[in-house]
Each structure stands twice: as C-alpha cells, then as structure tokens.
Image (cartoon, rainbow, N blue to C red):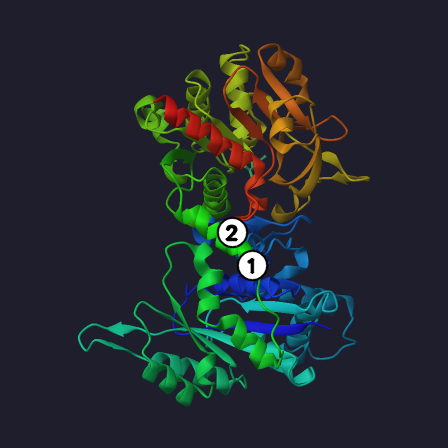
Amino acid sequence: MARFIFITGGVVSSLGKGLASAALGALLQARGFSVRLRKLDPYLNVDPGTMSPFEHGEVFVTDDGAETDLDLGHYERFTGVHARATDSVSSGRIYSTVLEKERRGDYLGKTIQVIPHVTNEIKDFIAIGEDEVDFMLCEIGGTVGDIEGLPFFEAIRQFSHDKPRGQCLFMHLTLLPYLSASGELKTKPTQHSVKELQSIGIAPDILVCRSEHPIPEKEREKIALFCNVRKEHVVPAYDLKSIYEAPLAYHRQGLDQAVLDAFGISPAPRPNLARWEDVMDRLTNADGEVRVAIVGKYTQLEDAYKSIAEALTHGGMANRVRVKAEWIDAEIFEREDPAPHLEPYHAILVPGGFGERGTEGKIKAAQFAREHEIPYLGICLGMQMAVIEAARNVAGLTTAGSEEFDHEAGKKRFEPVVYHLKEWVQGNHKVERRASDDKGGTMRLGAYDAALTAGSRVAQIYGATAIEERHRHRYEVDIKYRDALEQEGLCFSGMSPDGKLPEIVEWSDHPWFIGVQFHPELKSKPFEPHPLFADFIRAAVETSRLV
Ligand code: GLN
C-alpha cells in the first residue's frame, strides 16, 4: 500500500509547489521507488478545459483524454510517469459528482454536507490506485487559509487519521521574505502559515522554505522550534537558473533524505542521480544558440505554451545547444510583412490555438517558412494553417479555410479544407459528437495511434511507422484534398490507422517542414527529448550554420 505525501503551500502563491512535488517524485524514483503525482485544485471549474489560457496557462492533456492543470505536465516531465484522468481533480468536479449522486438519490435522503460528503469524495479520489505505487504525492492547489481550499485540507487531515500511523506525511512550502533595510530573513510569515495549518489539525512534517538569500543556521533552528518540526526537516529552496536543477538542488538540501527519515525508511536506498546529472550537463555545457520564433496568439503569458517551451529546451539538450524561443503575435503579420520579423530566426513554430483571431498571420508565417526554406513545425492549429496555406497558395484553392472560423462568424466564407469532425474511431470504438454535447466534451482528446508512411521524414525521425500521440481539437484536415495537395508535394505522411484522418503533413522538397495534428510537446521529457523537437532543433542548428 502506498505512502502518501501531501504538499501544501502558505504565505504566498506561486512558490513552486508543483516543481517541488515533481522534483521530490523524481528523487524518490532515483532511490528505486515507484511514484504517482496528483493535483487537487480548489477552483470551481469542473476542469481547466474551458479556462482561458490567459488566465490559467496551458491545458495539459493526458493519454486517457483528461484536460488537466499544467502542473501535471511538470509531474510527467520530471518522472516520466504518464498522468491519468484520475490524477487531477477540482472542487468543481468534486461538487458536481456529489450533486449528481444527490440527484440520483444515492445518499438516501440524507442532508448533504461538506463534511462528510464532500470530504469523502475527496478522500476516495486520493485513494484511487493506492496499491499500485510506493508513494502517492498529492499537491493541494492554492494557499492554506483560502476559503475554497478548506474542504481539501480537512479531507487530507481525515485521510491521514484514517490510515495507520506513519503512512502519511505533510510537506508545507513557505516563503522567507528578506528585509533589505535590516538585512534579515523573516520567519514570522512561515510561523503564521504553519499555525494556520495546525488550526485545521495538520502538523507539517517537513517545511520547504523558499528564499532568495542563504538561510542561516540559527534561522533554521528558529523555524524548527517555532513550527514544531525537526531542524533537518527545514529544507531551504533557493532560486534556480533552470527548473531541471530542482531534483539535484533538493537532493543537496536533503529533501529526499528528510522524507525517508520522516517515514522511518532506514536504511535509505542510495539514490542514482545519473539521469539528472546528464540533464544538467547538457544544459550547462551547451555550445551555441538557435533562435526559434513561436507565432501564436496567447503571447502575453508564457505559461500558455508551457509544454512547448519545455519541449524546445529538451530539443536543445538533445543537440547540446541553447534554444532561445521568442513569442511573436501572429496578428502583426496581418498588417505587416512577416519577413523582417521572421528573418532573425533559425526556425518557426506555430502552436495550437482556438478561434479565428490571428490565423491569417499564422498562415503568413507558414508561407514564409515554406518559401524561405526555414524549418517549420506546425502543431495542431499550426498544421491546419500550413495545409490552408498550401491549398491557397500552391494548389490554387484560393478560398481555402477552416470551418472553425465560419462557425464563429456564422456565415460560409471558406472552402472547408479543415472541417468539423462529427464521428471518429478510437481504438475499437466509434466516438460521436452531438450538438447537445457541452463545450468541454466535444473534442478529440487524448492518445490516438497514427500510421506513418515508410520512408517519410517523420518515419525516419521517429524511427518507427506506428506512433501514439495526444490530441485536443475539434477540426480535422479533410482527406478530400489529399490528392491535390500531394501532387504539389505536401505529403500526408501520417494518418489515423483507418486512413481517414490526416495526422501529419510534410513538404517533401523542403529542408524541414512538418505539421502535426497532435501535441508532441506533451510527451517530451528532459531525459527523453521528443524526437520531433530534437530533430526540429537539429534542423534549426543547420539553418544557423548557413547564415
Ligand atoms: N482550433 C483547432 C481545432 O479545434 C486546433 C486546436 C488546437 O490547436 N489544439 O481543431
């Protein structure tokens, strides 16, 4: 049966709980344990699928088709363990389940209350699959003291009480602010935050203290004394140059040792950190730099394309170069010539996106990449735009466009080269989309197989002709146009196994131009860069040598 580690945060938000959880997961793996990481989010949205990327950052999609919090992306990148739908839950989901049960009469007429009905639902969620791993790490979103978070804190308190002693551990992240006037780190906010936790009945076993300055020994002792934790269990967390330093940095500060101590696991298995040492070696000993332009819509918030930014970094690590990714607002190209904006880059990436705004600019970016032989990677909407560009400017279908934009505008303006798919096959099942489906439920979501054409560039890159990648979209390129486009050299080199849905297109006479209907960035890891990103950056390195 698993041991449980609950990760909470206090003082301020954005302390890096997700990263600390992911790094701890990686360190436990390095000591030979199996782990699973979970995120419990207090917001009332049922899932992040319909939340704006401006507000919430990227939606991370799991193999089994759940739209989840971007922290699950960190978890996967650090542990390589594929997240599942049951690894992410929000208050909204919990409440909607409770209310459904109430409507069905499952509670036999009882009065439904936060305790025990909501807390029971949360506890059941935490326990899913508890026999499968050595450690289950559950991160609670938000900060202790938030009204929304209370049922989660109450649930983890009860959970640890229900379990035999020593099977659950509480790790709390806080901040030690630095007052430059007095030249001191202040521990009071941490003390208050721990008090807040204690008032709910939770006594933290480990405190992870974020600080911009070294934490003196006597401050550590003070925190230990006032917060009722052992001094060795007060773990400093300093700012890092790269998130991938986190496992080694936390190990140096003794986090994994503290966790094993707290569980009484002795002797602790020795860690094998070779994977992370190699990652750091590739990051720090990179030679040269390539510049990649990301032409998209959600350019103000970096988190909106979190996995893409990380996958590009991984691609750089595979080639031992630094990748400088810069975001360019696609709408600029609707007013201005893209050439002066794009010429400084060695490669162009057009990411996924929804809605018409900026799409004409993305089409211009694809055209620029095709005509100037600049490596181009189009992801999801970025592939659709590349196909529309080819249809309009090469195959002579001047009115080519996507039904998505016609739906939005409420009139028919385009020849639907990209159309709204209503039914498809997943594995052995037929999936249908109905007009009555709610917004969250109408996408082709999660892992799907694709068959690659032998001898194609993508088959070479993957070193395989059968792949599986994650999807999140409503629209598809119509195979009706395949012949016309292939005649011009745009090969449909990846298809769904039934041959109906284009998964990958590539220009055969271009140095590197690939569009994919899926999201390869979701499966890239620092210790296992995604082959498409690794090869995309390799091609960018080649371009950089030409100029
Ligand atoms: N908006 C497009 C679709 O729904 C692309 C989605 C995406 O890029 N994730 O098909």
Query: Label 2 vs label 1: CA separation?
Result: 8 Å
506 or 410: nearer the eye? 506
Q: In this view, does 299 lie to the left or right of 107?
A: left
Quadrant for the N terminus, please. bottom right
User: Callout 1: helix, strand or loop?
Assistant: loop
Q: Which of marks 2 and 1 is nearer the N terminus?
A: 1
Callout 2 crowding tier (Cα within 10 Å): few <14, some 14–19, many ≥20: some
Q: Is residue 524 left or right of residue 429?
A: left
Rendering coords of residue 236 (x, y %): 40, 72
Say what amino acid the circle numbered 1 marks: Asn
Rendering coords of residue 296 (x, y %): 43, 36
Task: Give the residue pinned by disc 2.
Answer: 51
16 above or below 278? below
Whether residue 533 can be seen here: yes
Whether residue 153 can be seen here: no
Q: Is residue 79 left or right of residue 547?
A: right
Q: Is residue 244 left or right of residue 80?
A: left
Tell me whether the residue at label 2 lies in contact with that at label 1, contact meaning CB atoms closer than 8 angstroms.
Answer: yes
- Residue 542: name its quadrant: top left
Task: Give the residue pinned by disc 1.
Answer: 45
Quadrant for the C terminus, please. top left
- Residue 462: name its quadrant: top right
Disc number placed over residue 190 in the picture, else none: none
Rendering coords of residue 179 (x, y %): 23, 74
Queried on whether the Cβ of the residue with tag 1 lies below 8 angstroms from ligand 1, the answer reads no
Ligand 1 positioned in quadrant: top right
